[in-house]
Amino acid sequence: MFNFLKKGSVKNISPKEAKKRLESEDAIVLLDVREKAEYLEKHIPNSINIPLGKIETIEKVVPDKETTLFVYCLSGRRAGNAASQMSKIGYKNIYNLGGISHWDYDTVSGK
């Protein structure tokens, strides 16, 4: 009856839990929603970059709305915004990882 409320709830995930799941599960998409220049400066390995302003293009990159998505930015604000937008267009397994500023593990620069 109230299915519209559960369309795509966004969950939070800690960096520690995200790292553990990324190491053990292959099907997770790690999404960086910062601007391209920020991404090139430093990002989590194996993440893809879709800036918040272009988040609607996620459907081209990740067409399966059942895919597990871990979303992050610098501090967590843009990640929350992106997660909310993706939830509204039907993505069901979205986790807000927050900001790369809280990621205490390896990062890379460049592409």
Image: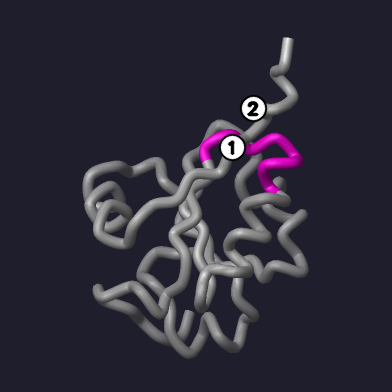
Displayed quadrant of residue 53? bottom right
Residue drawn at point x = 59 percent, y = 37 percent: 9
The residue positioned 53% from the left and 80% from the top of the image is 39
Name the residue tied to disc 2.
Answer: 6
Residue that label 1 marks: 9
Residue bounds of the magenta highlight: 86-93
Magenta span has 61?
Answer: no
What SS does tag 2 mark? Answer: helix
Q: Which element type, helix, strand or loop, lies under badge 1?
A: loop
| Tag 2–tag 1 contact (CB < 8 Å) | yes
Q: Is residue 55 left or right of residue 8?
A: right
The percent coordinates of residue 44 (x first, y second) are 38, 71
Q: Amino acid at mark 2?
A: Lys
Task: Give the residue displayed 22% in from the left and 52% down from the top.
Answer: 20
The image quarter containing residue 78 is bottom right
Image quarter of the N terminus: top right
Q: Residue at x 48, y 79 (%)?
A: 111
Residue situated furthest top in the rendering: 1
Mark 2 neighbour class, 10 Å CA radius: few under 14, some 14 to 19, many 20 or more: few
